[in-house]
Amino acid sequence: MARPAASPEQRELQRQRIRFAASELHQSEGISAVSIRAVAKKAGVSPGAIYSYFSSLSELMRSLWLEPVAEANRRLEAIAASIDDPLERIEALLNAYVDFALTEPEVYRGAVMYVRPTAAPEPDVAPIDEVPFHTLLVAALESLGVDDAALSAQLLWASLHGALALPINVEIYELDDPERLARAMVERLMLSLR
């Protein structure tokens, strides 16, 4: 006789158990320790069971950062809604992005600096206009009358991300700390917009 299907509540509980196991491995041993087998062992399920909840290891890892990123997006939207002047809004958004990276370093690294192993399957690509940080920058840039605001928003984001990521990823050189580089980058980006 076949086992009865799990209820939606049971499935959600199992999904959360798997996410918790992956999160514990990531926090205690680092990203390299997180594999389907390791997560399955920690969660007390078979490796195959994980694939009934997550299509890939990448999807599982992204799920760990969904809520903190959603909260950061809500903060960005609140900031944007509270500032009428487009230049002030852009500067506040850029600084809020830096604050997120510095106050939530593990989430930032996982959600924004995660580098997919070459052996892992390519993720589904979502439109950039689904990213609140980008769309908020685009709206402010359009208010300023900037041509190709979407490209300009990506350039602002890429510049700031680079200032945050370079000293983290290239540890063999004496680079300034990420906060100092990122704050200086915000100043220079704002100068270029003015």
Image (cartoon, rainbow, N blue to C red):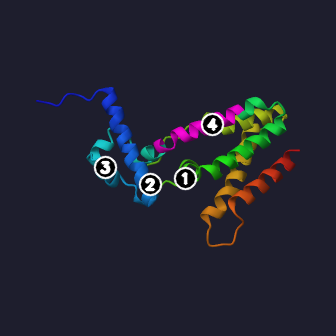
Three-letter residue code for mark 1:
Glu
Three-letter residue code for mark 4:
Asn
**Residues under numbered marks 3 and 2 in contact, where contact means CB atoms less than 8 Å apart:** no
Q: Which residue is mark 1?
A: 106
Q: Which residue is mark 2?
A: 26
Magenta-drawn segment: 63-78
Few, some or many residues within 10 Å of mark 1 (<14, 14–19, 20+): some
Q: Is residue 6 left or right of residue 54?
A: left
The answer to whether 184 is drawn above or below residue 149 in the figure is: below
Mark closer to the chain start, 3 or 4? 3
Where residue 1 sits in the image (x, y, percent)? Answer: 10, 30
Few, some or many residues within 10 Å of mark 2 (<14, 14–19, 20+): many
Three-letter residue code for mark 2:
His
Magenta: main secondary structure equals helix
**Residues under numbered marks 2 and 1 in contact, where contact means CB atoms less than 8 Å apart:** yes
Q: Is 107 in front, or is 60?
A: 107
Mark closer to the chain start, 2 or 1? 2
Q: Which residue is mark 4?
A: 73
- Which disc, if any, is residue 66? none
